[in-house]
Image (cartoon, grey):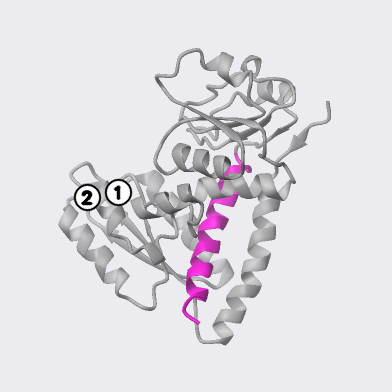
């Protein structure tokens, strides 16, 4: 069976080439897209992610405003910071890096972000709009997965799709996006019984469970499309790549698969939001 490696770096490069042109056009009209990132606390992984996103913005000419709050920040203080950014006309997108320290009500903080600046797709309103089919800024990893499928002309229509994971910013919204593309969707999770048997019926598998090398090739049917949204310590995804590669017709690598496209979708959403200011 011919294997197709779903190269996220190639998809990302294509997206960013288009964005560079759009940013230049916006700047010529007096609008510089601006993404504000909020980091609370001293989580090293979060600091790395924020830095990566800032560097990606810089390369495209997108302004990146970084706000670093102490680990003792309260929900009220974080909400106040977000509200200030909501009212700042120079800021087009707001990203609250998660997780946040445990004393903070993360959902309240997310839902404070104005819907027109929710470029990371984390608000309850944004999720609802995505599920109903008219969300402008879906959560970035689900948007990346759908973009990869589209880039490689892999249709979800009529396919059996199994999503392993039900987080509010990955499993649930990608299930909704696949359903909106007329796939038949099964959403699995930690309490799902007989997961291998369910996966054996899947034409499309989305791994988003946060367990390294969890999904095994023997669980995958021949010719399935495997999209690995996991990213664990040691650059390991949620699927056992070697064994799943043997069974799949198409598969995303880790790293270099869904991850680069996720960041590109954040940039695209920020540019889209800035374009609405014209």
**Left or right of 151, for residue 169:** left
Position of residue 214 relative to residue 183, above or below, is above
State the separation of the CA atoms marked 2 and 1: 7 Å
Q: How far across and down, in percent of the image, does residue 152 sit?
A: 74, 46
| Mark with earlier residue (2, 1) | 1
Residue 237 seen in the figure: no
Q: Secondary structure at mark 2?
A: loop
Residue at mark 1: 42
Residue at mark 2: 71
User: Within 10 angstroms of label 1, few (less than 14), some, or many (20 or more) residues?
Assistant: some
Q: How far across and down, in percent of the image, does residue 96 sit?
A: 35, 55
Tell which residue pokes out farthest to the right in this image: 2
Q: What span is colored magenta in the figure?
A: 255-278
Residue 246 seen in the figure: yes
Location of residue 95 by image quarter: bottom left
Please report contact status of discs 2 and 1: CB closer than 8 Å, yes or no. yes
State which quarter of the image contains the N terminus.
Answer: top right
**Left or right of 189, for residue 153:** right
Q: Residue at x 50, y 56 (%)?
A: 134
Q: Residue at x 20, y 64 (%)?
A: 80
User: Within 10 angstroms of label 2, few (less than 14), some, or many (20 or more) residues?
Assistant: some
Q: Is residue 259 magenta?
A: yes
Q: Is residue 81 magenta?
A: no
Q: How far across and down, in percent of the image, does residue 182 sit?
A: 61, 40
């Amino acid at each position: 069976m011919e294997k197709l490696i779903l190269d996220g770096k190639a998809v990302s490069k294509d997206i960013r080439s288009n964005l560079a042109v759009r940013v230049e056009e916006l700047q010529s009209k007096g609008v510089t897209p601006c993404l504000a990132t909020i980091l609370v606390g001293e989580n090293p992984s979060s600091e790395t992610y924020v830095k990566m996103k800032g560097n990606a913005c810089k390369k495209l000419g997108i302004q990146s405003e970084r706000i670093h709050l102490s680990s003792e920040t309260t929900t009220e203080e974080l909400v106040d910071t977000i509200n200030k950014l909501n009212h700042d006309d120079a800021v087009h997108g707001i990203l609250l890096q998660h997780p946040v320290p445990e004393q903070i009500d993360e959902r309240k903080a997310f839902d404070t972000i104005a819907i027109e600046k929710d470029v990371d797709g984390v608000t309850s309103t944004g999720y609802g709009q995505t599920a109903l089919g008219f969300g402008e800024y879906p959560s970035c990893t689900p948007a990346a997965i759908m973009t990869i499928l589209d880039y490689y002309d892999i249709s979800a229509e009529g396919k059996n799709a199994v999503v392993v994971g039900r987080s509010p910013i990955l499993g649930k919204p990608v299930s909704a996006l696949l359903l909106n593309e007329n796939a038949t969707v099964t959403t699995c999770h930690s309490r799902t019984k007989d997961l291998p048997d369910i996966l054996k019926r899947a034409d499309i598998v989305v791994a988003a469970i946060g367990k390294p090398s969890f999904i095994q090739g023997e669980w995958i049917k021949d010719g399935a499309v495997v999209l690995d949204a996991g990213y664990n310590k040691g650059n390991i995804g949620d699927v056992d790549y070697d064994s799943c590669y043997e069974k799949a017709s198409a598969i995303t690598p880790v790293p270099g698969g869904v991850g680069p496209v996720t960041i590109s979708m954040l940039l695209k959403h920020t540019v889209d939001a800035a374009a609405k200011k014209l």
